[in-house]
């Protein structure tokens, strides 16, 4: 068994494990640790606990120390440096005429690196920009091109539900979201109805998908040829949540509603879709 604490470096981000070196560190405390990016300050979100060593994906690193008042003052100063670096970088981007949008700037705790996050629809040659920034800040410069979902997570905002973005509020990682989820949940395939502010499929489509998949198992597809108490016909509509199925009678052409237990599938449907429409919607799945 290995004793660990869980540390998060952003308010909503991944949790990384570190060895507390025998110290009992409370949740909410700031600690100084060494990461792949250098020395960083993070917040303890999981208190001391033991886990099996086989559950560790990488070797466990020790914490350096619990953050002191001097460390916390340094963090505040770094935030001011990030604001200044953001303004300077925007000026440099305009000077070099680059087609890119600066989103965020991060300064590592030890000031050994400045990271600039940007979005762009095209590939950007920012080599001259990096040299320019390095001459100003006298530290390592790293520019990272991010996707629109990462941009939304960094900037935040309100979704169509009126609540703050899930990715900014509580989602540590982006979960895969697909057009199939929208279809399974009988949602309109209109991009404006199923897309978030970022222009990609809404993360919340994932939340109820498991329940819908369970309900769908006992339902026929649209177009299925079925037998009902009133004769045979084709399924024209399905309410997944209630289990109610609308069937158009082959003889009378009347449309009646039945519960799924009151019909028998003779031949299931194919659910043929407009391939061109689906190909367009597939772009919404990309990060």
Image (tube, rainbow, N blue to C red):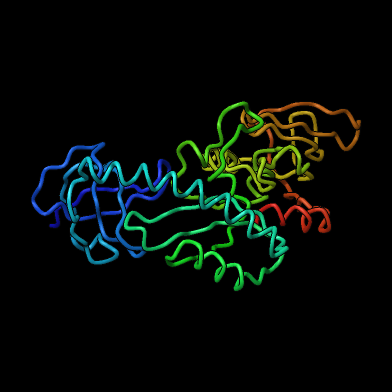
Q: Residue at x 45, y 38 (%)?
A: 170
Percent across and percent down for residue 197 are: 67, 40
Percent across and percent down for residue 7 are: 29, 48
Q: Residue furthest left?
A: 22
Q: Residue at x 44, y 65 (%)?
A: 138
Please state which of residues 84 and 282 is positioned toward the viewer in this rendering: 84
**269 shown above or below 140:** above
**37 shown above or below 174:** below
Judged left or right of residue 239, residue 31 is left
Judged left or right of residue 96, residue 139 is left
Judged left or right of residue 19, residue 210 is right
Q: Residue furthest right?
A: 252
Please state which of residues 111 and 44 is positioned toward the viewer in this rendering: 111
Q: Residue at x 23, y 47 (%)?
A: 31
Q: Quadrant of the C terminus?
A: bottom right
Please state which of residues 118 and 44 is positioned toward the viewer in this rendering: 118
Q: Quadrant of residue 133?
A: bottom right
Percent across and percent down for residue 18 are: 22, 55
Q: Residue furthest front?
A: 136
Q: How many marks?
A: 0
Please state which of residues 235 and 128 is positioned toward the viewer in this rendering: 128
Judged left or right of residue 283, residue 128 is left
Q: Quadrant of the N terminus?
A: bottom left
């Amino acid at each position: 068994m290995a004793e660990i604490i869980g540390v998060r470096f952003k308010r909503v981000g991944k949790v990384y494990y570190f060895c507390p070196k025998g110290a009992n560190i409370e949740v909410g405390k700031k600690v100084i640790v060494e990461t792949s990016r250098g020395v960083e300050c993070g917040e303890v979100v999981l208190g001391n606990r033991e886990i099996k060593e086989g559950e560790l994906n990488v070797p466990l690193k020790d914490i350096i120390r619990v953050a002191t008042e001097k460390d916390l003052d340094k963090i505040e100063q770094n935030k001011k440096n990030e604001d200044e670096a953001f303004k300077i970088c925007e000026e440099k981007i305009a000077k070099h005429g680059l087609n890119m949008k600066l989103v965020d700037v991060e300064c590592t705790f030890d000031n050994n690196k400045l990271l600039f996050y940007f979005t762009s629809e095209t590939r950007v040659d920012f080599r001259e920009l990096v040299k320019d920034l390095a001459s100003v800040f006298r530290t390592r410069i790293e520019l990272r091109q991010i996707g629109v979902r990462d941009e939304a997570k960094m900037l935040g905002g309100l979704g169509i539900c009126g609540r703050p973005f899930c990715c900014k509020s509580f989602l540590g990682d982006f979960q895969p979201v697909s057009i199939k989820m929208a279809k399974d949940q009988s949602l309109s395939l209109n991009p404006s109805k199923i897309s978030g502010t970022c222009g990609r499929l809404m993360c919340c489509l994932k939340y109820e998908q498991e329940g819908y998949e369970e309900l769908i198992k006992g339902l026929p597809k649209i177009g299925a040829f079925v037998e009902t108490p009133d004769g045979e016909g084709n399924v024209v509509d399905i309410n997944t949540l209630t289990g109610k199925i609308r069937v158009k009678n082959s003889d009378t052409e009347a449309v009646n509603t039945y519960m799924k237990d009151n019909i028998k599938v003779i031949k299931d449907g194919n659910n043929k879709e407009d391939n061109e429409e689906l190909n367009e919607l597939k772009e919404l799945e990309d990060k």
